Structure formats: structure tokens, C-alpha cells
Image: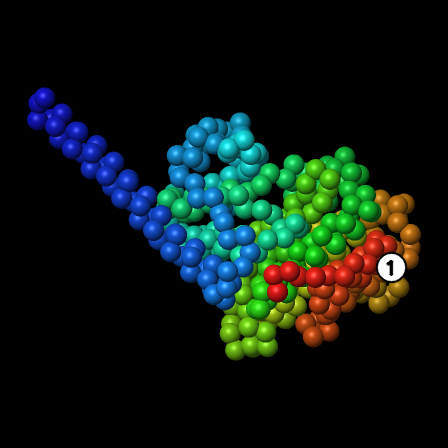
Amino acid sequence: MDKVQVKINEKIGNKRRLNLDSKELYFNQNGGILLEKQIALSQGRNVGPGQLKILSHKDIEKATNNLDPNLLVGSSAQRNVYKATIEDRIVVVGVPLQLERNPKLVDRNLNEASIAMVMNHENMVKLYGCCLDTYIPILVYEMLPNGILSQHLHGDTASIKCLKWADRLRVATDTAYALSYMHNALRKPVVHRGVSSASVLLDSSFQAKLGNFGYAVSINPGDTSERWSVEGSPGFIDPEYIETQVVTDKCDVYSFGVLLLELLTRSNPIRMLRGGRDLVDVFVSAFQNNCVMNMIDRELLNQASRDEIKQAVQIAVKCVAKKGTERPTMIEVVVQLRQIRGRVDVIQFTDR
């Protein structure tokens, strides 16, 4: 073997060792952060499912057929989402688009993983696994065939017609149930901070599951000294939170109220805000002037009774009250929505 080939082999070997060392480094760093988040979130108690399948980068490559474009089912500014199969389970894999380590995105992804390890509810998207040996952790979720709620509300006409009044009411109730669980399952409330129609996914029966827990935080009730950076989707963020930077469970109540308005009107809060109008301001003004029915989606007017719509409107308006203290709790919202659906259940939290 000549000297040139020896040097080439040495370089290849060094590169491979560096790659392996980097994977081990990422795994240790990400795993340590994940453990810290889990302990902090659970306040040192062993609660929730506690199990998350740890996958390797090779597992991800195999499951996605080396990121086969034909398996791509969605994308965002942060990641591409691929449909995949792992151990005979159909899942979706969120692969980050960034090619270098981003502390903020690392924190957000590990935050999602810690939520899944500590909290477990039928109306919360299940996180199947997590790959820790990449620069940014890769998350693997359960596959929900009917996709994101926003696509059904603002997509093509066929999708919109599929989402009947009963479906929308069920979606609202399911989402409210997930939030009430987050606010009450642990000693400290966990606030989602990112509630929107893009955070709600639908299964084959149009049952709703809340996802996107990257902005979720555990708070001390009544503590107004801690300040948080403002996170969430424009049009859904609590204006009191924007002004004070104080996070309370009522931040989620406000965002849920906007979501309920979106379900009732099929108006897009984000698009409206870009056009200089706020859905909450427009709707509350119509409510105060007794012309709110003009804003309700025509599809619903043909399917629901006026009394049912009025009850849902009243819940939404209470949720988007200017002051957090004037808003209901999510448990109260669940009870009221179930009353509209004709089923009043006693809410119990087994993890409390």
C-alpha cells in the first residue's frame, strides 16, 4: 500500500471516529437534558408512563428508507415529517431541517419527549420514540390518519364538509379534556402555550389529540415574579401574557377560546391577524351587538340548533375574556361542552 493510500485511510478512519464520538456526545448530552426535564416536570415523583423507546440514527434511516421523498407526508419551518414503520407500527418521524446544533430546537424537542414520559392521556398525541444520537433529537409519533385540524377547517371544500357540527364539538371537548389534564394531573400545572388548530390532530374517527408540546412549561400557581418569553401562534396568544410575560393556566384557556371561535366560524385567526384584524375582537364586537350569528359557519347553521351554537359561543366568549381571572378553568369548560353534547361526566385525574 503506498503512502498516499495510507493517508487517505487514516483520514477516513479519523472521520469515522469523529462521527462516532459526535453521536456518543449528542446521545449523552441529549439524554442528560431529557432526564433533567423529566425530573423537573414530575417534581421528583415517578408518574406517567415513564417509558420512551430510544432509537438510533440507523433505526431512523431504515424506517424512512434513507429519508425517501415518497414517504414525506408534511413539513414545517423546522422539520420534515415522514411516514414510517418501526416494529410493525405505523408512525411519523419528524426530521429536523437544520444541519447544525440549535440549542433552542434541541430544548423544544426534548421538552416534547419529557411531556410524553411524564403525562399520558387519550387525547394527547403519543410519542413512540426518540433518537438522541443526532445533533437535534428526532421525535417519532403515533400516526393519526386524518392529520391536522387546520387542514380540515381551511383546506379544500371536501375536507370542510367532512367536519360536521358533532365532529367539531367532539374536537373541542377532546382538546379541552387534554388541557384540563395538563393543568391538573401533577402538583404543578403544565401550561401548553402553543394551542392552535395546527396543534390538534385527528384520528380515523375524528377523535382529537393535542400535540406540539415543545413550548409547554411547569409553573408555580400564583407566582407572578417569573417572566417567560412569549411563545405560541399569532392570533392565539393571550394578550395578558404578551403584556406581562407571566404564564398561568389561563393562557391556555384563552388560546382554547380562539380555537373554539375558529371551529364555530371557520375563520383563520393567523390569516386575519396578517390582514390587520383580530378574530377575538371582531367576534366579541359582533357578540355585543347581537349579530354573532352572521359570523357562524353556514355549514353549522344547517346542522346545529341555535341553542347549541349560542351555548358554544358563550363558552368561547368567556374563555377569551381580557383578564385571566375572568376566564373559566379548563375543567369547567369540559363540563359545559359535555352538557352541550348531552353527556355530563365526572372528571377524575388518576395521576393527581
Residue receiving disc 1: 310
Residue at image position (34%, 48%) is: 26
Give 282 or 347, whichever is nearer the viewer: 347
- Identify the residue at the far left of this view: 3
Please indicate whether residue 118 sits to the left or right of residue 314 in the image: left
Count of labels in the image: 1
- Identify the residue at the far top of this view: 1
Where is residue 175, by image quadrant?
bottom right
The spot of residue 213 in percent (x, y) is 56, 54
Residue at image position (54%, 31%) is: 88
Please indicate whether residue 299 sits to the left or right of residue 144 in the image: right
Give 286 or 202, whichever is nearer the viewer: 202
**Residue count near mark 1 (Cα–Cα under 10 Å), binned few <14, some 14–19, many ≥20:** few
Q: How is the image coloured?
A: rainbow
Residue at image position (58%, 46%) is: 126
Residue 308 vertical position relative to residue 95 in the rendered view, above or below? below
Residue at image position (49%, 47%) is: 52
The spot of residue 133 in percent (x, y) is 37, 44
Q: Helix, strand, or loop for circle 1? A: helix
Please indicate whether residue 291 sits to the left or right of residue 46 in the image: right
Residue 192 vertical position relative to residue 160 in the rendered view, above or below? below
The spot of residue 1 in percent (x, y) is 9, 21
Give 194 or 140, whichever is nearer the viewer: 140
The spot of residue 77 in percent (x, y) is 51, 45
Give 40 or 352, whichever is nearer the viewer: 352
The kind of residue tagged 1 is Lys
The quadrant of the picture occupied by the C terminus is bottom right
